[in-house]
Image (cartoon, grey):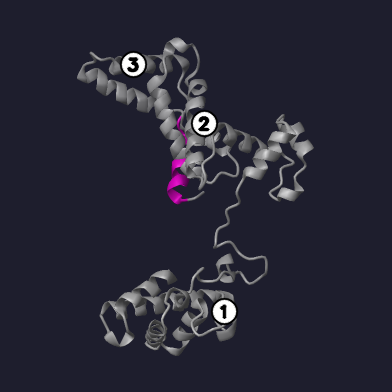
Amino acid sequence: MSSQYFSNYLAEIGNVPLLPPQREIELSQIIQRGLAPNASELEIQASGEGRIELARHSLRLVVSIASGFHDSSLTLEEMTFTGNVGLMEAAKRFKGAFKTRFSTYAFYWIQMTIREAIRRSRVIRTPVRRGRLIQRIRQAQSFREEQSAQDLEKLHQETGIPTKSIKQVLQDQCLFVSLDRPTSDESGDGIEALLPADDKTPAEVVSSEEELSALAKAVTWLTPCEQGVICGRFGINRAKIETLRQIATHYGISVERVRQIEKLALKKLRSRLQMGDNSAGSLHNQRACLATTR
């Protein structure tokens, strides 16, 4: 469970029984009367209460549907509460004349709302139809995260989707990796530890010798350790930019400690520049340099 609140929520709705069919019909009639253009205040109030009662007795259905979405960018808790929005919409639209149970009618609205939330949560949004294909493929037993390990023929047999479509869908998928994801070694450091600080260094931004001299002078405000971290991370007076891992190894400290020192050093530099210390050279140029570092 993602939170104690959600755990308590699941325990609470687990004790709410389903409504008998006749009560669902009665509530649907109350709800619809309150939605009529000429509805009285009492009918409107009763309609709202009826929607809540109808939906409350079907909250477990939302959890069940949300649990079926594997490999989603949303947590079960997020999908559940998103699905509850669809449940309330279904309660508003349900009519006893449909001659079906409310859970059957609400299934579509709950699932549609969750699918839309998942689609919107992606960095690159995909069409609804393409998103459904992706979902079916990822739920297949033979699906593999490694692109080279995919057996298109098996995926075709399990999903019924043509191999050509499966291949196209998989090729279109972009892989997003968190910078906090551990590297393949046993250090426990994130991928960020292996990346340079920025595409451009402060030295590449400034052009004249005067600006470079002012930048080097600004760094002298820092402690020796802070100077080493900043110069290494941004290639100041260095042959190349160093990664967090390389700096951590050099000083015999953790990657997280290097990150902390870097953050503190940049804060010191910005603070000093904002005080308008003329000994550091052009304030405008210094701010431009620091703006590129983060």
Q: Which residue is mark 1?
A: 240
**Point 61% across, 51% down: residue:** 175
Magenta region, residue range: 3-16
Residue 32 disc label: 3
- The quadrant the C terminus occupies is bottom left
Q: Position of residue 133 (x, y in %)?
A: 63, 34
Q: Residues within 10 Å of mark 1 (few under 14, many from 20)?
A: some
Q: Point out the frontmost of discs 1 and 3.
A: 1
Q: Position of residue 100 (x, y in %)?
A: 50, 15
Q: CA distance from mark 1 to mark 3?
A: 71 Å
Q: Is residue 133 visible?
A: yes
Residue 111 disc label: 2
Dominant secondary structure, magenta: helix
The amino acid beneath tag 2 is: Gln
**Point 34% across, 16% down: residue:** 32
Determine the secondary structure under disc 3: helix
Q: Residues within 10 Å of mark 2 (few under 14, many from 20)?
A: many
